[in-house]
Amino acid sequence: MSELELASLAARLDRVESIEAIKALKARYLNACDSQEPEAVRACFAEGEVVIDMGYFGHCENRDEFVDNIFVPRGCHDSVLDMHHCSNPEITIVDAENASGIWSLNYRNINTAEHTLTLLSALYHDEYKKVGGEWKISRSRTEYRTALSCNYEADSLVVNKADRSLL
């Protein structure tokens, strides 16, 4: 195998390894959200300026603002039962240290204190940076596609909202 062929093979392998590392990063983030682990969520994002735009749920300029002002107050309670599932990743490696991705989100939230059920679908539009050899989320925008909000009791389920957002 020539040096040119070896270099091409190494570049292709690096691209595949980067895509797999980004998939693992997104899985860690989603699992940390569902497990209510703020520090694990924080670790998925780059330090410094990181735009996290969750539409009507909030807009943050860094990972600490997101974790401390949105994730912990809304998601870290015994009564909050979340499920985040992402699929259909479209990951583009821009260069050795930058990438982008689009993910389909299927989200379920059961709040046992408020007796609510929320189902959402959305697209995550993410950007990633390689920091110290590790991929981190550097920007994330949520594009909501569908939303269903219900109240439940022992024998009933009442639909409050069925639309493209919860607004």
Image (cartoon, rainbow, N blue to C red):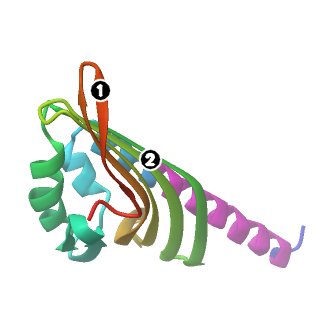
The reply to whether residue 132 is in sight is no
Region rendered in magenta? 4-24
Q: Nearer the viewer, residue 7 or 89?
A: 89
Q: Main SS type for the magenta part?
A: helix
Taking the spot 22% from the left edge, 39% from the top edge, the residue there is 36
Taking the spot 82% from the left edge, 78% from the top edge, the residue there is 4
Q: Which residue is mark 1?
A: 156
Q: Nearer the viewer, residue 128 or 97?
A: 128
In the displayed structure, 3 sits above or below 153; it is below
Left/right of residue 63 with respect to residue 73 in the rendered view: right
Q: Please tell me whether mark 2 sits on a helix, a strand or a loop.
A: helix
Q: Which residue is mark 2?
A: 27
Looking at the picture, how far across and down is residue 86, in whole percent? 49, 50
The reply to whether residue 150 is in sight is yes
Q: What is the residue that sits farthest to the right in this orientation? A: 1
In the displayed structure, 55 sits above or below 80; it is below
Mark 2 crowd level (few <14, some 14–19, many ≥20, 10 Å Cα): some
Left/right of residue 5 with respect to residue 130 in the rendered view: right
Q: Please tell me whether mark 1 sits on a helix, a strand or a loop.
A: strand
Mark 1 crowd level (few <14, some 14–19, many ≥20, 10 Å Cα): few
Left/right of residue 64 with respect to residue 135 in the rendered view: left
Q: Nearer the viewer, residue 162 or 27?
A: 162
Taking the spot 15% from the left edge, 41% from the top edge, the residue there is 76
When asked about the image quadrant of residue 166, the answer is bottom left
First of labels 1, 2 by sequence position: 2
Q: How many marks?
A: 2
Looking at the picture, how far across and down is residue 41, in whole percent? 26, 51
- Amino acid type at circle 1 is Ser
Q: Nearer the viewer, residue 127 or 148?
A: 148
